Image (tube, grey):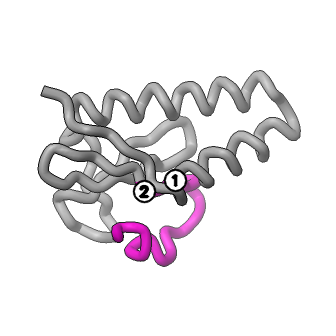
Amino acid sequence: MDYQLAWSPEAAEDLEAIAKYIARDSLFYAQSVVSKILETSITIGESPLVGRVLPEIGDNNIRERFVYSYRLVYVIRQRKVLIIAIIHGKRLLENIEDRFG
């Protein structure tokens, strides 16, 4: 049974910012990256425990999946998965706890 999947407003903003940034150089690659991120989010709803535990937090319910050079961060609560951030792998996870709300 799949988990209910939702996106936080901040994660949706992250995705939009990534698309705009990549589109400055290539609309094709921007669409490709966004599509892959969306596809991966669907698989998270199907099998949320496949992602690795976020090492900076160490909470078994806060996990991530990698999509190209991006970290797709999510939290698992009962039968729900909330995508909370999409962050480039070279960036630090600052104030990520603020998004768990």
Residue at the image position 38 percent from the left and 74 percent from the top: 97
Residue 58 figure quarter: bottom left
Residue 51 figure quarter: top left
Under mark 1, the amino acid is Ala
Camera-nearest residue between 20 and 12: 12
Residue beneath label 1, please? Answer: 11
Residue 85: x, y in percent? Answer: 48, 56
Residue 61: x, y in percent? Answer: 20, 57
Label 2 crowding class (10 Å Cα cut-off): few <14, some 14-19, many 20+?
many
Residue at the image position 22 percent from the left and 52 percent from the top: 76
Q: Secondary structure at mark 1?
A: helix
Residue 36 vertical placement versus 95 (above, below): above
Residue at the image position 20 percent from the left and 66 percent from the top: 59
Residue 72 vertical placement versus 92 (above, below): above
The N terminus lies in quadrant:
top left
Residue 29: x, y in percent? Answer: 73, 27
Tell me if label 1 and label 2 are in contact, CB under 8 Å: yes
In screen coordinates, is 60 left or right of 43? left
Residue 90 vertical placement versus 58 (above, below): above
In screen coordinates, is 95 left or right of 54? right
Camera-nearest residue between 92 and 81: 81
Q: Which residues are magenta?
A: 84-101
Residue at the image position 17 percent from the left and 59 percent from the top: 60
Which badge, 1 or 2, is on the more N-terminal residue?
A: 1
Residue 93, magenta (yes or no)? yes
Residue beneath label 2, please? Answer: 84
Residue 4 figure quarter: top left
The C terminus lies in quadrant:
bottom left
Q: Secondary structure at mark 2?
A: strand
Under mark 2, the amino acid is Ile
Residue 55 vertical placement versus 78 (above, below): below
Label 1 crowding class (10 Å Cα cut-off): few <14, some 14-19, many 20+?
many
